[in-house]
Amino acid sequence: MQSNTRLGIWLMIATTIVFATQDGISRHLAGEYNVLMVVMIRYWFFALFVIAISRRTAGSVRAAAATKQPVVQTIRAILLITEICVMVAGFTTLGLVESHAIFTCYPLLISALSGPILGETVGWRRWAAVLVGFVGVLIILEPGVTVFSPYALFPLTSALLFALYGLLTRYAARKDRASTSFFWTGVVGAIAITPLGLYFWEPMSGGDWLWMAMLCVTGATGHFLLIKCYEVAEASAVQPFAYFQLVWGAAIGMTVFHEQLRLNVGAGAAVVVAAGLFTLWREQRAKRSVNAAA
């Protein structure tokens, strides 16, 4: 398929809008109902979507599920479902603005952990970017200036879990197809969350069922757009535009939930994003050097 970077960029921006909307709906529902129940229902729909996509891309469910590394795939799926639960809990306690600002450090964590987990070489420039990004997180948290909010551990933990998930996804890609990883992510995640979600089941109002339906639709739509995005453009070319989710998430937090964008949060997020963009640029440059030498 011919690469179309411009279309890929627009698809990535559309993806961030949909995912930010999903985050806003999650914040509303998790403020009224148990987080595990909300995520469970969302994952039921996601699993059905994954099965449908896998059958189309792999030819059958059995072909999509075939893997040489079931343990790795299972751990990946559990990491992601746990990350989602923790992040949604962060939305309800810390808010969308600060949760997204802190969560943006996950590319830096991927860069820092890619050495010990994947055996990749991380040069001093990328380590410097990681340290700068850490400074940005400290600016957001303001340790020593204000009392550290324990709720900030939610997006910090979520960023770490998502980084580990991303690294294991890279590791799994060495032996499994993307459709296989996608299948295990949705199906195993749904199976893992169901017992917990059912335990905390509580009746929902008719209006909130409508919001739940919108949550499921936005989740499937976001993943569909992301798949299409990576089909038409290289990941390295469109990944920097994923930071737009911070912008849309903050906008929803301020306009819908009346959150405030404090100066330190805006400044710290800018530092983290700049460090993350530098890291992505260095990774892209390193790949080009390897390809040129091959």
Image (spheres, grey):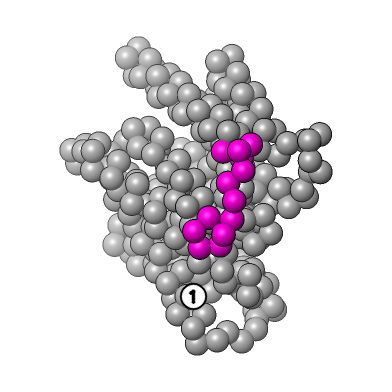
Residue 263: in magenta span: yes
Question: Residue 252 or 193: which is nearer the viewer?
Answer: 252
Which residue is under mark 1?
212
Is residue 81 part of the magenta span, yes or no? no
Report the front residue among 258 and 71.
258
Q: Magenta stretch?
A: 254-266
Can residue 129 be seen? Answer: yes
Q: Nearer the viewer, residue 248 or 184?
A: 248
Compared across the picture, whether 288 is left or right of 273 comes to left
Up/down of 140 relative to 129, above or below: below
Q: Badge 1 local density, few (<14 within 10 Å), some, or many (20+)?
A: many
The number of numbered discs placed on residues in the rendered structure image is: 1
> x%, y% of residue 64?
40, 58
The three-letter code of the residue at mark 1 reads Met
Residue 7: quarter of image: top left
Tell me residue 235's x, y (percent). 36, 37
